[in-house]
Image (cartoon, rainbow, N blue to C red):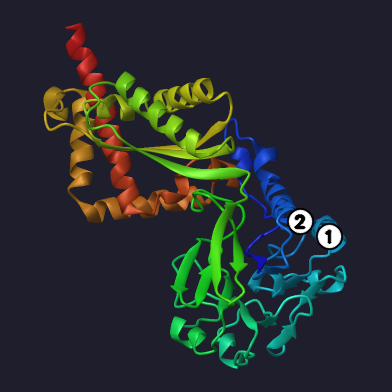
Amino acid sequence: MFRFIHAADIHLDSPLKGLERYDGVPADEICNAGRRALEGLVQLAITRQVAFVLLAGDIYDGDWRDYNTGLYFVSQMARLRDAGIPVFLVSGNHDAANRMTRSLKLPANVKVFDDGAAETVVLDTVPVAIHGQSYATAAVREDLSLCYPLANRGLFNVGLLHTCASGREGHAPYSPCTVEGLRGKEYQYWALGHVHKREILCDDPLIAFSGNIQGRYISETGPKGCLLVTVADDLTATAQFVSLDVVRWEVADVDVSMAQGVDEVLDEVADELQRLRQKADGRLLAVRVALAGRSPAHTKLLAQRHHWVNEIRSRTVDISGGQIWVEKVQIGTIAPETSVRMDAMADSPIGEIASLIEELRMAPDRLSELGVDLGAIARALPGEIKEVSEIGQFPNPAWLASILDEAGFVLQDYLQKGDEKS
């Protein structure tokens, strides 16, 4: 019996653009999370005394700002060398785009597969044959696996491949392949990279995406890490997921349909954040709060959006002691059918504004024209203003419609306050 680690898509020192625009962001923790996750991967390999480590591409994230990124990777591979653990890797599309990658010498325990043709390495220490091919360019459109050799009989065969498989949303269609094609090689394990979401494509043989070891954005939610694979004496394999992420990204979906007021909304948000915190096992959480449902609180939430967003942030700091950072609050609630009519002050200036909003809502063509006009203004604004707001969405009619709805509820809130005073 022996074990090995399958990991991929480290994207070491990935630049997190625009992160500084967020209030209260734990920038240092998030920016260094990738390095800490790699350290965890190396420590796991040493602690579990694995026979080897597989890295299925995208070690880096395009060109480095300087050599420190490459030198850091070298230092971690040297830790594995000192522990007697070999590393086998293929370069992915981001590695191939990096001009400095090829000029940096890696420790002797690291084997980078050739990018001209598929190679096979047979190990001396365990009965294993590893087959792989690196990317020669940043965009490989052909199925590289077609040229991988058939399995070596009597050995545990591993295919190391950077691929989109049959295609995955959000990932470029590089080196597409099929499960049937991979199975045809008669390998016992396929270690795939490129897709950042962990997925088992086939159980017999095991064909798997390990996912990336550290989420980088809100689109990369949930536990991230590697697969620890155990190979029995009969050369059958089982894979166990091991989390390595230091910062975990999550979406807190909160249905506030039962909330009668904003205070109840805040309580429900707090409950969901506490639940996510318990699942995170002490990690820093980066959370997007998404409110949904038909609720009487809808009007107040939209009319005083800035206030209530900051109330959620304040409550989050209070309950988590700084272990949860709210990346964004999305208010997707719906107003009750009994909401105040905006034409209640039809003869007043506010009533005229309300009528204009209603006209625009009922005339998609006019809304599109408004979007084009505002889009031209938005393009002329400084970049830092566009980053802080969603002003770049102006040409999008659906986004404009949502802004109109929000303006309508601001007016409703004004009217309600007027009624309360009268």
Q: Position of residue 147 (x, y in %)?
A: 61, 92
Q: Residue at x 45, y 30 (%)?
A: 274
Q: Residue at x 62, y 82 (%)?
A: 157
Nearest the viewer among 86 and 247 is: 86
Amino acid type at circle 1 is: Ala
Q: Which residue sits furthest front?
A: 233
Is residue 78 toward the left or the right of residue 196 in the image?
Answer: right
Is residue 18 toward the left or the right of residue 335 in the image?
Answer: right
Q: Position of residue 276 (x, y in %)?
A: 46, 37
Q: Are marks 1 and 2 in contact (CB under 8 Å)?
A: yes
Question: Can residue 101 be seen by looking at this rendering?
Answer: yes
The residue wearing badge 1 is: 83
Mark found first going from the N terminus, 1 or 2: 2
Q: Secondary structure at mark 2?
A: helix
Circle on res. 338: none
Question: Can residue 333 be seen by looking at this rendering?
Answer: no
Q: Which residue sits furthest top?
A: 422
Amino acid type at circle 2 is: Ile
Nearest the viewer among 298 and 365 is: 298
Vertical arrangement, residue 288 with respect to residue 203, above or below: above
Q: Using the rendered view, name the quadrant where residue 350 is placed.
A: top left
Circle on res. 46: 2
Q: Using the rendered view, name the quadrant where residue 364 is placed.
A: bottom left
Nearest the viewer among 147 and 351 is: 147
Q: Using the rendered view, name the quadrant where residue 340 is placed.
A: top left
